[in-house]
Image (cartoon, rainbow, N blue to C red):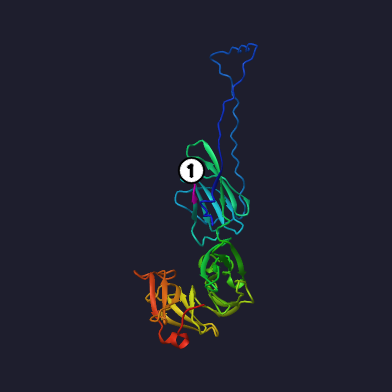
Amino acid sequence: MPTLLSSILILLSTTIAIASRVSQPSSSPAPSPTPTSPSTAPSVPVQPIVTYIPPSAPSKAPVTKIATYAGAGFENLAFRFNGQLLATTAFPAPLLFYIDPLSIRPPIVLHNFTALRNTVGITELAEDRFYVHGQGVDGGAFRVYEVDMRGVLGSALLPNGMTCIRRSDDFVLIADTILGGVWKFNVDSGRSQLVIKDPSMAGLPNKTEFAAFGINGLRVQNKTLFYCNSGAQTFYKMPIHLDGSSAGKAKLIASGIACDDFALDDWGFAYVASPRNALIRLDTRTGSQLVVAGDFNQSSSDIISASSARFGVGDSDLTSLYITTNGGAFVGAPAGSQGVSRVDVGDLAQFFGKNGQYR
């Protein structure tokens, strides 16, 4: 599958020369200039400077800064059809930025056009095929580049959790936290397809930052897709086909659950990594919750902002969960709180399902 960099092609390199217009010699002699007094200069009309200040609206529209980059002078922009922005910079470097209009993630430098002094105009000719131009580093050559975004995981806004249905499949399922859906990505062809988009997977409306997040962690067990919605703090399940498409309606399992990624055991329990500093055992049949490790919303917890969980696969750790922690998405992080920890749930896992591997 071609990379983004290899798909950026120089389409045009044209040196623009500014030529002086020279009058052709005439067979008749040029007329003699009219003599003027050396003390009197010809009068040059001066246009008056008119300063017009347009009136202001009674109520001015609010302005919200959505992206900044130290020292960068942004010049032009274009939208992808999925609502994300591409923006060029005139100085100090010829950059192309990928910008999230919701400001949930910071601007990303998509490409540095090192053969240019700047990037100026940008437009979309066909879906996800953009053209950017700028002046060459030599100061005289203007070039147009094609930026092909078609191989960039479809139109994903924020890919997050990932899982598979069967290990023999040639595709994986990827949660899109901002779009509120599930992508099917073929690992052989590189093609992607939005196979599920459901209101239960969307973030809270008219919100920014974490509240705008939707579906996050997801797992498949017995032709059922389990997933959590971080912004709405909900946990759902949905029947699916073996090709990854939906086979029925979403069913709410629990609400009011601070969740990120999770692991499933074979008895219907989800062990949810909570960004509120805890590991929560959720009964996917009844919706009941129990904190089995850490201290919910306490900065003194042994688990600070848990982000994912997996059961061990060896004989010695089948009843142990391995937890990743990012050290404090909500509560200040003590030194050394980021990393990977093991939680030995022991009898809890043995009683509720000794084999913790998910399928």
Find the residue positioned furthest to the left: 335
Q: Nearer the viewer, residue 311 or 249?
A: 311
Mark 1: give few (<14), some (14-19) or many (20+) Cα within 10 Å.
Answer: some
Magenta-drawn stretch contains 197: no
What is the x, y in percent for residue 352? 47, 86
Q: Nearer the viewer, residue 210 or 137?
A: 137
The quadrant holding residue 275 is bottom left
Identify residue type, mark 1: Ala
On the rendered structure, is 163 left or right of 82? left
Q: Secondary structure at mark 1?
A: loop
The quarter in which the N terminus is drawn is: bottom right
Find the residue positioned furthest to the front: 168
What is the x, y in percent for residue 231? 53, 71
What is the x, y in percent for residue 209? 51, 65
Find the residue positioned furthest to the bottom: 351
Above or below residue 185? Residue 125 is above
Q: Nearer the viewer, residue 100 or 346?
A: 346
The quadrant holding residue 327 is bottom left
Residue plotted at (41% across, 69% down): 326
What is the x, y in percent for residue 122? 58, 47
Above or below residue 235? Residue 74 is above
On the rendered structure, is 277 left or right of 51? left
Identify residue for label 1. 115
Number of numbered callouts drawn: 1
Residue plotted at (64% across, 77% down): 249
For the stretch drawn in magenta, the main secondary structure is loop
Q: Nearer the viewer, residue 256 or 61?
A: 256
Residue plotted at (61% across, 70% down): 196
User: Bounds of the magenta span?
Assistant: 111-117
Residue plotted at (60% across, 41% down): 52
